């Protein structure tokens, strides 16, 4: 592991390099991939005219767990002065990303038709999209 | 449990689940956007950011109204969804005619271009859904 100690907040704030960037990107791609899998699973259920099942909610919980890990990484990053270019914007998006799946899951599960699967599909794709936006904000793109 | 047959179907059921979900996501997006704008840069474009805040409140109200879907909330749904339809078309047209009409872009600028035109499509789907669910049908439970 290379040392990532960067002295001085000016140099560290905007520049995200080396292994730290790789860790964040890998985590992000993992969450996006899981979201796409979950969306595919939900899409399959829509096609089969089936309602959301409990196992799919567990799938959502796995996504949620990794989003929480992202939050921890972001906090650590922020504490070392290498956080997002615009912290307020980033955490706003993060909070939205964090709450969408649990709310959507509860909302979907109360409906016992295929429309509940559409809800899960929409929610999963939204989280994937928000991940991409968070990456843009983080890197200041 | 007895369904209130005379007042039409509940708007939060069936396809309505999906409609409320998309509304909820847009409400989050609009609310996040406007809070950020109000806190960070309100002075830059007060008109645009006031409009963003108004849009956010309307989206939140519409989401709850459609989700609850009781007869009393149905009126709120009609009004808020109606405001959105008028708002997105008006602001969209004005922003096309004059890019600087509001000083800065809003959720409704360019007919909701920044949000994949979802703000343009959604109110009309909402109005359609409110109209469709306004009379009870025999397939109430299957929709």
Image (cartoon, rainbow, N blue to C red):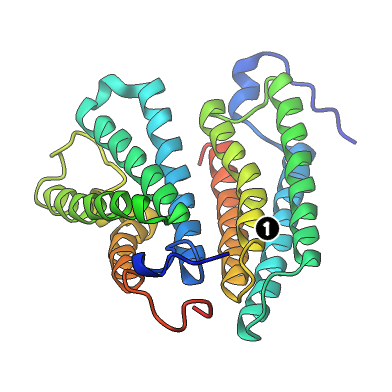
Q: Nearer the viewer, residue A82 or B86?
A: B86
**Which residue is at 58% across, 28% downward?**
A14
Check the picture and name the quadrant holding the N terminus of chain B: bottom right
Quick one: which residue is furthest to the bottom in this view?
A48
**Which residue is at 42% across, 29% downward?**
B35
Quick one: which residue is furthest to the top in this view?
A8
Q: Where does the image place residue B108, in percent across and percent down from the top left?
A: 27, 49
Q: Which residue lies under the disc numbered 1? A: A32
Side of B29 where A106 appears, left or right: right
Quick one: which residue is furthest to the right in this view?
A1
Side of B74 where B64 appears, left or right: right
Q: Where does the image place residue A113, in percent across and percent down from the top left?
A: 61, 75
Q: Where does the image place residue A120, in percent across and percent down from the top left?
A: 62, 64
Side of A91 where A75 appears, left or right: right
Q: Nearer the viewer, residue B28 or A53?
A: A53
**Which residue is at 65% across, 23% downward?**
A12
Q: Nearer the viewer, residue B139 or A18?
A: B139
Q: Specify whether residue A139 is in view.
A: no
Vertical comparison of B9 with A92: above or below: below
Image quarter of residue A139: top right
Quick one: which residue is furthest to the front in this view?
B2
Q: Chain of mark 1?
A: A
**Which residue is at 47% across, 83% downward?**
B139
Q: Where does the image place residue A78, in percent across and percent down from the top left?
A: 68, 24
Vertical comparison of A81 with B129: above or below: above
Q: Specify whether residue B2 is in view.
A: yes
């Amino acid at each position: 592991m290379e040392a990532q100690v960067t002295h001085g907040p000016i140099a560290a704030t905007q520049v995200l390099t080396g292994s730290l960037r790789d860790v964040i990107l890998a985590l992000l791609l993992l969450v996006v991939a899981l979201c796409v899998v979950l969306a595919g699973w939900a899409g399959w259920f829509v096609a089969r005219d089936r309602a959301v099942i409990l196992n799919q909610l567990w799938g959502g919980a796995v996504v949620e767990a990794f989003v929480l890990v992202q939050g921890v990484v972001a906090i650590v990053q922020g504490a070392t002065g290498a956080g997002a270019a615009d912290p307020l914007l980033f955490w706003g998006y993060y909070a939205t990303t964090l709450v969408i799946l649990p709310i959507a899951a509860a909302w979907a599960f109360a409906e016992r038709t295929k429309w509940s699967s559409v809800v899960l599909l929409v929610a999963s794709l939204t989280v994937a999209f928000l991940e991409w936006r968070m990456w843009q904000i983080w890197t200041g793109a | 449990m007895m369904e209130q047959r005379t007042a039409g179907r509940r708007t939060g059921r069936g396809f309505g689940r999906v409609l409320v979900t998309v509304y909820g996501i847009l409400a989050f997006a609009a609310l996040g956007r406007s809070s950020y704008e109000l806190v960070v840069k309100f002075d830059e474009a007060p008109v645009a950011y006031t409009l963003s805040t108004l849009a956010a409140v309307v989206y939140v109200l519409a989401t709850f109204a459609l989700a609850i879907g009781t007869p009393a909330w149905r009126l709120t749904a009609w009004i808020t969804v109606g405001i959105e339809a008028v708002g997105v078309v008006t602001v969209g047209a004005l922003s096309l005619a004059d890019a600087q009409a509001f000083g800065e872009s809003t959720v409704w600028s360019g007919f909701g271009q920044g949000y994949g035109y979802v703000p343009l499509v959604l109110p009309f789907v909402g109005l359609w859904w409110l109209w469709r669910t306004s009379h009870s049908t025999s397939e109430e439970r299957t929709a």
